[in-house]
Image (tube, rainbow, N blue to C red):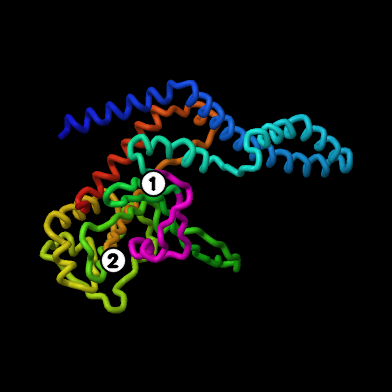
Amino acid sequence: MAEEIRESREEELERIRQLEASPEYQEKLRILREKMKINIRWKMYKIALVLGTVMLFAMFKFVGFVIAAVLGFIYVYPVYKRKQELFREKKENNEVLYVEKFLSPIVKEIFPMGEMKVTPDFLLDPVKKVCPSSTNYRGNTELSLHDSSELSVMNLYAYHVVESTDSKGRTSRKEVTDFYGQVFRMQFPKSFAGHIRVIPTERTAILKREVQDYPGKQKNELKIDTEDIRHNEHYNIFCTDEFMARRFLNPTVLDWFDKNISESQTAIYIEDSTMYISRYTGYQLFPVPGTVEAIDQLSLVEEYKKLRAEIDLIESFTEIFKA
């Protein structure tokens, strides 16, 4: 089996190398790099132009405004003109260019039906079931394999705002991170009667003290314990069908939970035939290159290696729940 996997990886890598070496792809990559770099420069130039205009106007009044207009025409207008030529009427930010135009084609070399997109289509209600109680949820960058289990994963950042007043009556607002990691969605092999939630009881060292609790026992739910004392210490289990819940929580699954709680805060929610899993990892998958230098170094082969490693990790993490 290991030999077959190794050969499959070598074949994938060779396809990627051949694709990257083709003149057609090199031209596409050149244009993509230019688009991403001009997006960064245009943002910087706009900020510089506004600040420069304000400063020059404050110093020289109308003359300062004229100077700013001349400098804008010399330095900013050529960038604007090139941006219009590259994008025409399309509005593509660097997140779209990197995720959907660069990474998604790599995914299709691995999973022909797979795709990546900037805006996830996860339903919010089940996502809330596997995250600490929060008020703001921001999902981004969904990877969908469209395999037999319809496995998808997205980045998620959840937070709430805390207000405080000091001794002088001054009010300040602080954004507190409740969740920062990934949420997985996949088809459960068998239809599950009712639902089950398995959520952490303790905050690990990753989480801040101000982080809010996971949702507690809800209406129509039962709270059950397992024979595994360690598991009872680390997790709360809520369900609507105790028989189905105990069938699911076999020793293999409990061992999986014990392993993952030591690596990241993990929670599960299953309803009908869909499973959601959250992992508080403290980082985002597939970060967009943020500098001109990083964009210049974009390589199809190198990005494939990173993407392949992430997909292998995702598949390994969810393998226990596949049919």
Residue 139 lies within the magenta run: yes
Eyeballing the image, is 20 above or below 210?
A: above
Question: Over which residues does the magenta segment extend?
Answer: 115-140
Q: Which residue is mark 2?
A: 271
Gap between marks 2 and 1 measured at Cα = 22 Å
Eyeballing the image, is 47 above or below 299?
A: below
User: For the point 26% across and 75% down, which residue is it?
Assistant: 221
User: For the point 84% across and 40% down, which residue is it?
Assistant: 65
User: For the point 35% across and 26% down, which residue is it?
Assistant: 15
Say which amino acid is labelled 1: Leu
Residue 57 in the image: state x and y as whole percent. Answer: 83, 43
Say which amino acid is labelled 2: Glu
Q: Which residue is mark 1?
A: 143
35 left or right, relative to 185:
right
Q: Earlier in the sequence, mark 2 or mark 1?
A: 1
Eyeballing the image, is 112 above or below 323?
A: above
Residue 173 in the image: state x and y as whole percent. Answer: 54, 62
Residue 187 in the image: state x and y as whole percent. Answer: 28, 56
